Image (cartoon, rainbow, N blue to C red):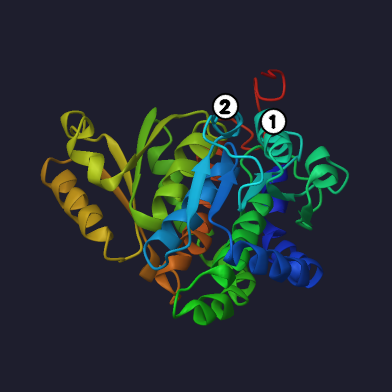
Amino acid sequence: MYYKMYYEMMEQPDAIRRTFDSELENMEKISEIAESCDCIYLVGCGSSISTCYSVRDALRSVSSLPVTVFTGYEFAYNKKLIEDENSIVIVTSQSGETADTLAALRKAKEYNIKTVSISNEPESSMIREADYPIVTLGDTETAILGTKTYITQLACLYQILFKASDYEEKDEILNQLTQIPDIIGNLLKTTEEDNKKLAKDLKDEEIFYCLGSGVNFGLAYKLAMTMLMEGAIKHACPLYSAEYRHGLIERAEDDVPLIFLDADQESDEITKRAYDNANEIKARTILFKLSDYADVYKLLAPFVLVIPLEWFVYYLAHFNGEDPGSTRHIGKVRY
């Protein structure tokens, strides 16, 4: 039996290709604007904010580009905005109708701040109202986890912001970004069985801790918040790897499952230390390591590691009798 999420996972490579074929020229214009801005605000919720965290942390490690991340209402209630400030707001949303993100977009427009929307729905409010709309061409997504919309949003943010950055090796990053669809296509074929087995082994666990540092924190956040909790209906908590020794170290007892994401970046030194300690105290450690899956620039780790994680969560839900794309309450509640 295949759930809707399966088909949407398989559409990820083509969704990126179509989006770049259609929107690359538009993204390059936005990069030119962002390059001269005093502040770049990234706004999103759920999977969308995880893409913001990932690109922010990737850029912080190599560039001076001034990037700040907000949730929608945090930005809307921000008292430090200045009218006509030399800034740009990039909002991300699968539906283009997320209430808090839309509130942020409208707050920016009130202050005459330049606005960009990245959404999968061409007729959505965010696409209609932004100064510079970008439509990700993944077609409508129905599975809650966010697969093709996540990967296309992330790719657009990397393209726009690394192009705008002063990073000396940005051309290599952008060149490898064009290879990501082929890499994802291969990973969809090669990582299913191992993660199906892992999911079967862990199907009775009720709580997972998800740890990452640097560029991988955003993915750890997505894994916990919108994959394990929303898709597999499991309790989960995202943590910076450096925070392992605060709180979690007192709960990492025998057989408590801890998922570590490792890109072998400089910041992953602390990830490795946390992983080693967790093994010493016999926690149940699960390691997703970039070098096991693809030979790509380390800052592109989320594009690679998300694929085996999708398979893991897909089958974790399946072995617990859940449809990984269904929801119980999301969609019924609007703030």
Side (left or right) of 281 relative to 66: left
Mark 2 or mark 1, earlier in chain: 2
Side (left or right) of 40 relative to 200: right
Task: Name the spot of residue 313 as percent of width and height, x first.
Answer: 51, 43
Indicate the amino acid at tag 1. Ala
Compared to 170, does 14 lie above or below?
above
Point out the residue furthest to the left here: 280
Residue beneath disc 1: 103
Which mark lies nearer to you, 2 or 1?
2
Side (left or right) of 77 relative to 14: left
Residue at 62% x, 74% y: name it: 182
Q: Residues within 10 Å of mark 1 (few under 14, many from 20)?
A: some
Compared to 169, does 323 lie above or below?
above
Residue beneath disc 2: 77
Query: Foreground residue, 191 or 116?
Result: 116
The part of the image, by quadrant, that contains residue 221 is top left
Residue 128 bears which disc, if any? none
Q: Disc 2 to disc 1, how far (Cα)?
A: 9 Å
Indicate the amino acid at tag 2. Tyr
